[in-house]
Image (cartoon, coloured by chain):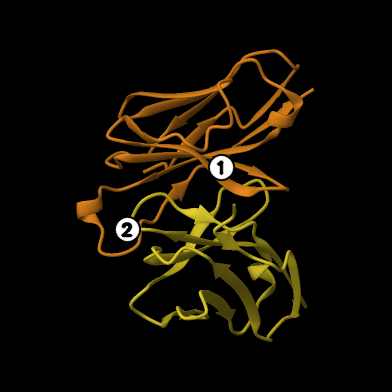
């Protein structure tokens, strides 16, 4: 059973606008949440993470929000750029062990 | 560092044949993970090692799959016999020791091995 869910398989956004990718989880023991970005024919690369004791973490154009009561997190990309077009994976782990991944959301940023 | 190195990048084989995928983790990393990516299931954890010892292999689909880590710089994932439903991209990833981390366990992934079983 998937403990990390990304219910939107794809998302299309215009360049310069905000991209919002969503993720839900079921396991209350998760203490870290991560986002990975994946280009075709490459492995996933780490983007940004957040600890369960925080509700927001920002790194340049990327911000991750965590709502523990709703077991929901989101990744905001502002402004979106064509180079951001990729598959984004949400991941979570309990106490620093292996990561549980969602199925991914394919983001397309159009000029 | 060259990152996590996987070989082969592509493998096409016939049903029933043995397949061996290889991985060299980042030097100094003591965790090694094998993941499989499919359209249906996304990225699923197959097995992971800590200090060359398998910690959790509950994700290994069945007895046809086996993984080994004979030393800190090499791991293999073997499928014998292979079946068409094993067709997927297999990723190896590594991460540093827990005591060296200040936060999340950030895995570094290899480029993957795309397996096609005919």
Res. B111 mark: 1
Q: Do the residues labelled 1 and 2 touch (CB within 8 Å)?
A: no
- Residue A103 placement: quadrant: bottom right
Q: Name the residue under label 2.
A: A95
Taking the view exactly as shown, the residue that stands out farthest to the left is: B99
Q: Residue at x 61, y 32 (%)?
A: B9
Chain letter for yellow, please.
A
Up-down relation of residue A9 to residue B6 (above or below): below
Circle 1: element type:
loop
Up-down relation of residue B25 to residue A101 (above or below): above
Circle 2: element type:
loop
Up-down relation of residue B83 to residue B59 (above or below): above
Pick the front one: B42 or A88: B42
As drawn, is B12 to the left or to the right of A63? right
Q: Which residue is drawn at 53% across and 75% down?
A: A73
Q: In which quarter of the image is the N terminus of chain B?
A: top left
Chain letter for orange, please.
B
Mark nearest the camera among 1 and 2 is: 2
Res. A56 mark: none
As drawn, is A62 to the left or to the right of B74? right
Pick the front one: B75 or A85: B75
What separation in Å lies between label 1 and label 2 (alpha carbons)? 26 Å
Q: In which quarter of the image is the C terminus of chain B?
A: top right
Pick the front one: B13 or A26: A26
Residue B47 in view here: yes
Up-down relation of residue A13 to residue A103 (above or below): below
- Residue A107 placement: quadrant: bottom right
Disc 1 chain ID? B
């Amino acid at each position: 059973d998937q403990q990390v869910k990304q219910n939107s398989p794809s998302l299309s956004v215009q360049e310069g606008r905000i991209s919002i990718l969503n993720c839900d989880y079921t396991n209350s023991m998760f203490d870290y949440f991560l986002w990975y970005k994946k280009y075709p024919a490459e492995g996933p690369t780490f983007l940004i993470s957040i600890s369960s004791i925080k509700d927001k973490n920002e790194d340049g154009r990327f911000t991750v929000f965590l709502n523990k009561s709703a077991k929901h997190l989101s990744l905001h990309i502002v402004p979106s750029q064509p180079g951001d077009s990729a598959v984004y994976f949400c991941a979570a782990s309990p106490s620093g062990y292996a990561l549980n991944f969602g199925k991914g959301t394919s983001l397309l940023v159009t000029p | 560092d060259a990152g996590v190195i996987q070989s082969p990048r592509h493998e096409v084989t016939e049903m029933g044949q043995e397949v061996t995928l290889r991985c060299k983790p980042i030097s100094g990393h003591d965790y090694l993970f094998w993941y499989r990516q499919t359209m249906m299931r996304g990225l699923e954890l197959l097995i992971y090692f800590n200090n060359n010892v398998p910690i959790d292999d509950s994700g290994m689909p069945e007895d046809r799959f086996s993984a080994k880590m004979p030393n800190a710089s090499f791991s293999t994932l073997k499928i014998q016999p292979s079946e068409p439903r094993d067709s997927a991209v297999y990723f190896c990833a590594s991460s540093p020791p827990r005591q060296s981390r200040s936060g999340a366990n950030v895995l570094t992934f290899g480029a993957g091995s795309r397996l096609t079983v005919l």
